Amino acid sequence: MSSHGDPIPMTSSKSGPLSGTANVPGDKSISHRSLILGALSVGETRVSGLLEGQDVLDTGRAMQAFGADVINNGNGDWSVHGVGVGGFAEPDQVIDCGNSGTGVRLIMGAMATSPISATFTGDASLNGRPMGRITDPLALFGTQACGRQGGQLPMTLIGAADPVPVRYTVPMPSAQVKSAVLLAGLNAPGETVVIEKEATRDHTERMLAGFGAKLSIETSDEDRIITLTGQPELTPQTIVVPRDPSSAAFPVCAALIVEGSDVLVPNIGLNPTRAGLFTTLREMGANLTYENEREEGGEPVADLRAKFSPDMQGIDVPPDRAASMIDEYPILSVVASFARGKTYMAGVKELRVKESDRIDAMAVGLRANGVKVDETEDSWTVHGEGPGSVAGGGTCATHLDHRIAMSFMCLGMATAKPVKIDDGGAIATSFPIFEGLMSELGAAIRRDNR
């Protein structure tokens, strides 16, 4: 069942050349953080280009529940009238974060050092995801958590009345954990220090500095050390959200595997902590070029042009690249199905605790469509046989996971037989215009219950 209603079965069929311009939505990671940091500022933050997917809208409602005034001005333009660091009010209702692991974990961090309590829940997928990785470091500040067995939602957090700063080494590459600790550190006196062994997406650090927080970063061969001075007064900002590279991955990858395609995807954020997929595709031999490279709002941006690429080869994806493309492995596995040879992806056990077990979900679905896949706990290998080699004809379970759903819809655009998914409802959480956008490019996708 879809997270917000009845299941939406969908079918994707072999498509003619995809062509045109794909204006994908705003970056989801930056959209979440814009609303949260706007709520923690004093005054009005203006955000244009906000992703108006369900995940981000749930975060906006949560900020309202904590006392901020969040206003939709139309056309992706939003205003957030913040309450300041430490100014969150105790919400009257349970905070429902829907399908969003990013939303719930960042919000938990933002409220963890205020003397209030809040109860969090989500859909079936989110309620099955691990929260101990967040509540364990938040406990060091003095925060208390009470949830279901295994540290799962629904969960109540009791914020620290007298928070203390912490020094925390993130045990796994996770921008969500890092960000939650930094957001909690905002309302703790003194310096909170977060140490990463592997660099992860750095939107939180960039945006904290932009809002006026005192923050320093030291890097060495072994560590990345982020030091945040607590209890600042954040200054409201005007934010232009770049378009989401994780959403851009779908029209880009579809163009690479559908014969004759030529698609332009403009204004894509190419933060080096997010662009691992595009680097990997080019190493495989994809005809993918960056045009009009520039910087906007402190983030590198370019227009991506993707063309059908019949000569792609399988490669070994470096394990240390996983943090920069963790959400893109499902669609990479689709591209790998049409490359020649083996694509080996290691260091990806984090995929097993995303919205679904993404390794298992993709492996089962690809096999159902004639692709050979091997997997271990921390790796998987897709055996590709080149363009036109994938039979299709299978029905794939999406497990309430938007990226699984969109990946299989892209697969069906280049298979001999149509590919079906059991439920595309979760697509709205991150890419609500996916169906219309892909159809305008020439994709043959449909909802089966119409």
Image: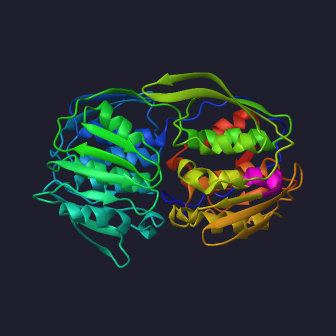
Do we see residue 424 in this rendering? no
Q: Quadrant of the N terminus?
A: bottom right
Picture quarter containing residue 96?
A: bottom left
Q: Nearer the viewer, residue 166 or 208?
A: 166
Picture quarter containing residue 279?
A: top right
- Does the magenta run of residues contain 428? no
- Does the magenta run of residues contain 336? yes
Does residue 306 sit above or below 65 in this rendering? Answer: above
Q: What's the residue at 48%, 57% (across, down)?
A: 4
Left or right, 373 with respect to 428, comes to right
Q: Nearer the viewer, residue 420 or 177?
A: 177
Q: Nearer the viewer, residue 383 or 224?
A: 224
Q: Position of residue 174 (x, y in %)?
A: 44, 56
Q: Position of residue 377 (x, y in %)?
A: 61, 72
Left or right, 49 with respect to 322, comes to left
Q: Position of residue 118 (x, y in %)?
A: 22, 60
Do we see residue 67 in this rendering? yes
Q: Position of residue 141 (x, y in %)?
A: 20, 60
Does residue 140 sit above or below 301 in this rendering? Answer: below
Q: Nearer the viewer, residue 30 or 202?
A: 202
Q: What's the residue at 28%, 36% (across, down)?
A: 38
Left or right, 219 with respect to 244, comes to left
What is the magenta range?
334-342
Q: What coloring was used for the rendering?
A: rainbow
